[in-house]
Amino acid sequence: MRTLHLQRPSEEPWSQSRWDRLDRETRALALAAPTEEAAWEIITRRARAVMRAYTTSFFIVTRFLPAMKRARVEAIYAAVRYPDEIVDTFHLSEGQRLALLDEWESGYEAGLDAASIREALEKGSPCFLACFTRVVRDACIPVEHYGAFVEAMRRDARPSVFATLDDLIEYYVYGSAIVVGYFLTHVYGPASSGDFARALSSARSLGIALQLTNFLRDVGEDQRRGRLYLPLDMLGEEGITRPDVTDARQHAALSRVLRRLAAITEGYYREAEDGLDAFAPDCRIAIRACIDVYRQLNDRIARSPQGILHRESVPMSDKFRVLPASKYWRLPLAYLGW
């Protein structure tokens, strides 16, 4: 999984037909809703179900956001989840993936041209984009950011390699993760108007950190999909010209590359942490928890004795330790119903 780049529960990913059915059912309910707010509630409840199905960690930490900000984050998550599924899990050819991404981006543009969720749906925008484009309007998110995200998904549909870490960040991570951090920053808001630039900088660092941790965890899975997110220069310094995680002779060298990248990633987590106070106070618990959970994962990858083919995860008990105990009562309720 490449977006936001979070840990998924053990259940199988949803099929394309399941996503299509969800869109049809949600669209019908939203169009029948008596008000704009009722349509918003219908779609965001289903976006919440998407988040709950795909990511344990991010779902938990976002339970500690204020209700309106939480709903906006859920809308963002659903809007980035589906394109990621197009390139990661749907059984499609490269051409079919690219065509679906083009269709999806057209739905985004239709939503931007609409003044309401109902109008976006009537213009043919998928339900999650109809909801997301309302977030874009209300939170003043630059419209081009989502285009950069979709372009990163196109890169996944036709994988390429990256000469250096700077290249990886500029040509892939920017679209796949940094702009998603910018979406969230516009929703979270700054502590004061003068803090917004620093909040964006913190979000950039956290987006890079989360994405790099995800790469380090999924080297084997990425190779199976024909992708390589380890910089070629770092591999070359270890004598690896054709990386192959199934070749035991490369494991020691690949592990050194992973440890080196994990150390660099820890620096990005520190930068994100340093800017935490730039965000609105009512969002800091959630952001802090996100940093702490994925920082743990990054550290476990760096110290793992089980080898590069082992996919590390953070135990649920460790995830709970980064959350305020006084707020635990919210979590059981979050898993009930839609």
Image (tube, rainbow, N blue to C red):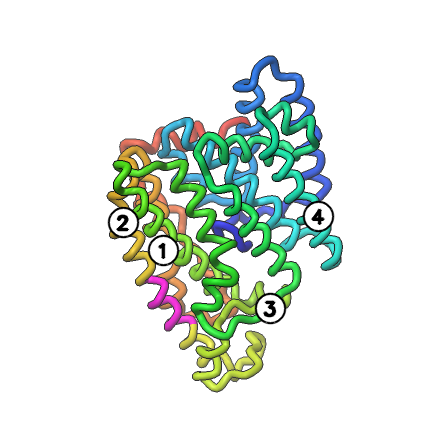
- What distance separates the C-alpha of mark 4 from that of mark 2? 37 Å
Residue identifier under label 2: 275
Closer to the chain start, of discs 4 and 3, is: 4
**307 falls in the magenta region:** no
The amino acid beneath tag 4 is: Leu
In the rendered structure, are the residues bearing label 3 and label 1 in contact, judged by CB atoms less than 8 Å apart?
A: no
The amino acid beneath tag 2 is: Gly
Badge 4 marks a residue whose secondary structure is helix
- What distance separates the C-alpha of mark 4 from that of mark 3? 20 Å
Q: Which mark is residue 205?
A: 1
Badge 3 marks a residue whose secondary structure is loop
Position of 25 relative to 199 (above/below): above
* Rendered image quadrant of residue 332: top left
Pick the quarter of the image with the N terminus.
Answer: bottom right
In the rendered structure, are the residues bearing label 4 and label 2 in contact, judged by CB atoms less than 8 Å apart?
A: no
Residue range (magenta): 258-266
Q: Main secondary structure of the magenta part?
A: helix
Closer to the chain start, of discs 1 and 4, is: 4
What residue is shown at x 31% (from left), y 42% (from top)? 196
* Rendered image quadrant of residue 39: top right
Q: Please tell me how crowded label 3 is: few (under 14), some (14-19), or many (20+) other residues with Cα within 10 Å.
A: few
Q: Give the left or right position of residue 45, taking residue 212 as reference.
A: right
Relative depth, front residue between 288 and 193: 193
Q: Please tell me how crowded label 4 is: few (under 14), some (14-19), or many (20+) other residues with Cα within 10 Å.
A: some
Q: Please tell me how crowded label 1 is: few (under 14), some (14-19), or many (20+) other residues with Cα within 10 Å.
A: many
**260 falls in the magenta region:** yes
* Rendered image quadrant of residue 42: top right
Residue identifier under label 3: 160
Closer to the chain start, of discs 4 and 2, is: 4
Relative depth, front residue between 44 and 117: 117
